[in-house]
Image (cartoon, rainbow, N blue to C red):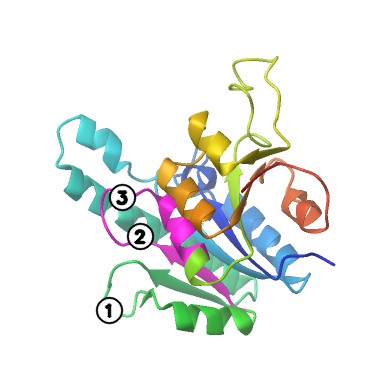
Amino acid sequence: MSKYKRILLKLSGEALASTEHTIDPVTLNKVVDIIKSVLSQNIEIAIVVGGGNIFRGAALAQAGMNRITGDHMGMLATVINALAIADVCQKNKVDALVMSGFSIGGGVCDSINHVRAKQALNKGRVVIFCAGTGSPCFTTDTGAALRAIEIDADIVFKATKVDGIYTSDPIKNSDAKRYDSLSFDEAIEKNIQIMDVSAFALCREHNLEICVFSMLENTNTLLDILKGEPLGTIVRK
């Protein structure tokens, strides 16, 4: 039995894309299969999704776009991704609720409400958070930390392209070594780029562990970690 009862999974927008599709249907189905495997263990799951597959506000800000405008556009991109995940969830008989960090009318999705989110999770629904913190100048990593704290999650799972945190980029350096664990202070001091400093600091303040792992290469990895396998890298106090 897993020691975790409620988890938050942070997905990048880029993870949902392929060379052919901005939002890849095959990848979406993989994500939903992973969600179902978590639910099968009687573990509640919430998701925070990024929007980099559609729009990256920071990149356009460097090219001259107003930073606030760019961030608002980036947050809207996360809404699109969240709706896509929720749609495939519903088609696979997984009840999903999308909640946005800022108000969106027209019945598109609900606004963030931590009480209603926890009620939905208690009923076995998947809650998909989008629009980051709801404010510009914050990353979706910080949004993930904030939402995890709001819903009393036991841990944040950060899905990446590599299977943990390394001493250097393992794609560029074959001699890079993977950390089994790091403290928040070490992650900040070493300037680990896997999450931003604000996210690390929030999790440190609330004693909320982070597990960095690779999700889509082996779709059983998250389930294996939940069952106690020593995979990925844990960041804790």
> Which residue: 32% across, 41% down?
56
Amino acid type at mark 3: Gly
Query: Quick check: 43 left or right of 18?
Result: right
Query: Quick check: 106 left or right of 128?
Result: left
What is the span of residues highlighted in magenta in the rendered image? 125-148
Q: Which mark is residue 74?
A: 3
Does residue 16 show up magenta in the picture?
no
Asked if the residues shown at circle 2 and circle 3 are in contact, with their CB atoms under 8 angstroms apart, the answer is no
Q: Which mark is residue 171?
A: none
> Which residue: 77% across, 65% down?
3
Q: Which residue is mark 2?
A: 133
Does residue 133 show up magenta in the picture?
yes
Residue 42 image point, x, y percent: 75, 74
Amino acid type at mark 1: Gly
Residue 149 image point, x, y percent: 50, 65
Amino acid type at mark 2: Thr
Asked if the residues shown at circle 1 and circle 3 are in contact, with their CB atoms under 8 angstroms apart, the answer is no
Q: Which residue is mark 1?
A: 106
Sequence-first tag of 1 and 2: 1
Residue 175 appears anywhere in the view: yes
Residue 107 image point, x, y percent: 33, 80
